[in-house]
Image: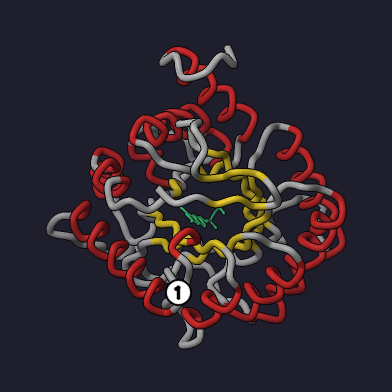
């Protein structure tokens, strides 16, 4: 297993088998109710600080929604949303930051301001210069699987064997990143729950998660509040109603050996992971 430290914290490579918790901070106009750009930045900062207090090991800052049907956003506008938040957090907190963007220009600005990780849902396929930029930036990079593109990915996703196809894709993208000059210790993979997948595909991937972990790269699992939870609980129309399933998903990820879970509900996730670890006797935290 690789080893990765960010801002002096060991994120991968220590003895703790529990996954690290990545808290989600969305800086999109509709993500904080007070509206307006300034309100968004203040709201995002308040939210980020709360997630740090709740025990987030890393924060994932995103300015572009990847929800099915979401409109594309120019890089300058995306940067204008996320950069004030990143700059303020770098100046005031010592929690490592990840930039959730598919655009190399935004990743470049975020890393220059102090971000430790580039989380790219396109696995460095969005722009011709993505691979070279990741190598040049010399930071951790998350390579996520997605079938199709965000606008249309949920139209009719198809696989013969979703676990095998996602594993082959991720192994290939990790090799491509290595060949482009990204350091071995910086490569992360992510099965991309909900990205061009039906509920059955997502469940098959969760069942087969050990095969993704067995590829040997640290795995991020992002399943928190995802839409497929409605396949089990159609009444959970509101994403905030999906906490129970989100915790079950994080615990399943931990049992399969993922290195990080990307979640909205940091406090509850930390509590659930600590309890599972205490029961397993992995920790004296209990
Ligand atoms: N999911 C979303 C965004 N970024 N990154 C990784 N690595 N893995 C994921 O599963 C992942 C991700 C989903 O984004 P969106 O639907 O915009 O909502 P939110 O950011 O609130 O999760």
The residue depicted at 31 percent of the width and 66 percent of the height is 147
Rendering coords of residue 279 (x, y %): 44, 12
List the residue tagged with mark 1.
124
Image side of residue 107 versus residue 223, left or right: right
**Does any atom of ligand 1 lie closer than 8 Å to the CB of label 1?**
no
Local secondary structure at mark 1: loop
Q: 284 or 48, which lies in front? A: 284
Please give the name of the residue rendered at 40% of the width and 73% of the height, measured from the top-left corner: 177
* Residue 55 position within the rendered picture, expressed as x and y whole percent measured from the top left: 68, 33
Q: Nearer the viewer, residue 159 or 94?
A: 94
Question: Residue at horizontal 57%, vertical 45%?
Answer: 11
Residue 31 versus residue 124 in the image, above or below: above
Q: Residue at x 36, y 62 (%)?
A: 145
Please count the marks in the image. Answer: 1
Image quarter where the C terminus lies is top right
**Residue 272, above or below 266:** above
| Front residue of 155 and 176 | 176
* Location of residue 32 in the rendering, given as x and y in whole percent from the top left corner: 74, 51
Query: Few, some or many C-alpha atoms within 10 Å of disc 1 (few <14, some 14-19, many ≥20)?
Result: many
Q: Is residue 138 above or below residue 31?
A: below
**Residue sitting at the far bottom:** 128
**Hey, which quadrant is residue 154 in on the image?**
bottom left
Question: In the displayed structure, does residue 140 sit left or right of residue 248?
Answer: right
Residue 242 percent across, percent down from the top left: 50, 34
Report the colour scheme: secondary structure
């Amino acid at each position: 297993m690789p080893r990765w430290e960010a801002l002096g914290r060991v994120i991968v490579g220590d003895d703790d088998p529990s996954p690290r918790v990545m808290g989600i901070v969305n800086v999109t106009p509709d993500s904080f109710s007070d509206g307006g750009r300034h309100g968004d930045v203040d709201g995002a900062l308040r939210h980020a600080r709360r997630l740090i207090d709740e025990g987030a090991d890393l924060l994932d800052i995103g300015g572009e929604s990847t929800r099915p049907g979401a409109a594309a956003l120019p890089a300058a506008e995306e940067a204008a949303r996320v950069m004030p938040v990143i700059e303020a957090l770098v100046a005031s907190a010592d929690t490592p930051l990840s930039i959730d963007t598919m655009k190399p220009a935004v990743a470049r600005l975020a890393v220059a301001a102090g971000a430790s990780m580039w989380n790219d849902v396109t696995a460095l396929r969005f722009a011709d210069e993505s691979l070279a930029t990741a190598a040049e930036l010399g930071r951790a990079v998350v390579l996520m699987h997605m079938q199709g593109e965000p606008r249309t990915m949920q139209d009719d996703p198809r696989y013969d064997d979703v676990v095998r196809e996602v594993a082959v894709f991720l192994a290939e993208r990790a090799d491509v990143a290595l060949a482009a000059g990204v350091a071995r210790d910086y490569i992360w993979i992510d099965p991309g729950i909900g990205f061009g997948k039906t509920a059955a595909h997502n469940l098959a991937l969760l069942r087969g998660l050990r095969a993704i972990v067995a590829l040997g790269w640290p795995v991020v699992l992002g399943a928190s509040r995802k839409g497929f939870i409605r396949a089990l609980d159609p009444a959970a129309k509101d994403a905030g109603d999906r906490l129970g399933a989100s915790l079950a998903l994080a615990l399943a990820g931990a049992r399969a050996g993922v290195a990080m879970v990307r979640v909205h509900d940091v406090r509850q996730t930390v509590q659930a992971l600590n309890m599972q670890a205490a029961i397993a006797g992995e920790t004296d935290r209990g």
